[in-house]
Image (cartoon, grey):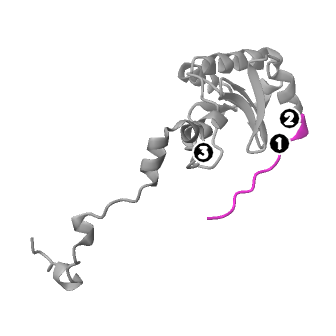
Amino acid sequence: MPKMTWKKSPEGLVSRFAEVVPDDPAVERRSMFGYPCAFLNGHMFCGLFQDHFILRLPEAGRATFLREPGSTIFEPMSGRPMKEYVVVPAAVLASDARLTPWLREARSYVATLPPKANKGAMAAKAAPPPKGRGPQAKTAPAATKAKKAAPKKATAAATAPKAPAAAAKRKPGAR
């Protein structure tokens, strides 16, 4: 598989992105794959990818937006469309009057989605604490600690002599 090479977004596009993304404390600006993006409740609603400005729109909004000359479904890799994302054509991007309503619609759409959990919190929740650490280790009663430390008793199955490997093999089709 050939290595993918992505190009940086042009400075003019990065500047335009910075101009038009709402200055709202609920909007988080961060980088995704090295490109500036805007998020609300953990969901991206607009961003840059190479020389494209992209928006995430609901189905009805997408259908209307795709009637704009030059707009397309966003495909970060050929044949791999991201169905909710569209590429903003240059004519729309150049006009505040045309772009601002679409940015509002993208932001409003992701506001309807359930908030995503913080990745840092999810990772901490998923990873169990190391053995012997954490609140359980400090609060466990002495009897429980002694029980855990006691060696296990040997069972009859564990001490019984093992059958020869040849006797354990079955012929194909035998039950």
What residue is disc 3 on? 133
Q: Quadrant of the C terminus?
A: bottom left
Binning the other alpha carbons within 10 Å of mark 2 as few (below 14), some (14 to 19) or many (20 upward) gives some
Please tell me which residue lies in front, 117 or 51.
117
What residue is disc 2 on? 14
Q: CA distance from mark 1 to mark 3?
A: 46 Å
Can residue 53 be seen at all in this image of the molecule? no
Q: CA distance from mark 3 to mark 2?
A: 46 Å
Quarter of the view holding residue 169 = bottom left
Left-right relation of 48 to 150: right
What residue is disc 1 on? 9
Q: Provide residue 41's location: percent of width, then percent of height.
A: 65, 23
User: What's the residue type where badge 2 is placed?
Assistant: Val
Please tell me which residue lies in front, 79 or 38.
38
Q: Secondary structure at mark 1?
A: loop
Q: Secondary structure at mark 2?
A: helix
Q: CA distance from mark 2 to mark 1?
A: 7 Å
What is the span of residues highlighted in magenta in the rendered image?
1-12
Please tell me which residue lies in front, 23 or 19.
23
User: Mark 3 or mark 2, which has the lower sequence index?
Assistant: 2
Q: Is residue 146 above or below residue 66?
A: below
Question: Residue 76 bears which disc, if any?
Answer: none
Q: Quadrant of the N terminus?
A: bottom right
The secondary structure that most of the magenta stretch takes on is loop
User: What's the residue type where badge 1 is placed?
Assistant: Ser
* Residue ID at (42%, 49%): 147
Q: Provide residue 64's location: percent of width, then percent of height.
A: 60, 20
User: Mark 1 or mark 3, which has the lower sequence index?
Assistant: 1
* Residue ID at (49%, 38%): 141
